Amino acid sequence: MVPLILFLAVWAILILGFVLLSLITTAMSLRFGISGFMTVTSNAAFVIVALFVLGATCVYLLGVDWSQTISVMPTTLPSLNQ
């Protein structure tokens, strides 16, 4: 039995990686990209969409019962004779 909270921890680690890479990408785009309105607009759109998706996911995750467990290996095999 695998606790569901383990999946939350793995998800959080992956989100931290996403945030780090997003910050680096946005900073490099603004610093070394072509200066202009579309550069700032596309970066702003990326950040807004990413924050919206992460926020909606966090709101959903607040309703999950993290004390549940998941059975990775089935305890019984289905019968071949039916």
Image: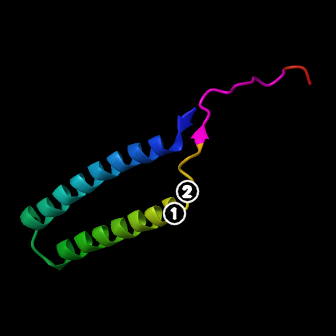
Q: Secondary structure at mark 2?
A: loop
User: Over which residues does the magenta segment extend?
Assistant: 69-79
Q: Which residue is mark 2?
A: 64
- Residue 40 in the image: state x and y as whole percent: 19, 75
Tell me, yes or no, whether the two marked residues, 2 and 1, touch with CB atoms within 8 Å.
yes
Q: Which residue is mark 1?
A: 60
Query: Which three-letter amino acid code belongs to the residue tagged 2?
Result: Val
Q: Quadrant of residue 45?
A: bottom left
Query: Which three-letter amino acid code belongs to the residue tagged 1?
Result: Tyr
Residue, x 34% and y 68% (percent of image)?
Answer: 51
Q: Quadrant of residue 53?
A: bottom left
Pair 2/1: label in front: 2
Left or right, 76 with reference to 36: right
- Residue 4 in the image: state x and y as whole percent: 52, 43
Q: Secondary structure at mark 1?
A: helix
Check the image and report above or below for 8 versus 79: below
Residue, x 25% and y 73% (percent of image)?
Answer: 44
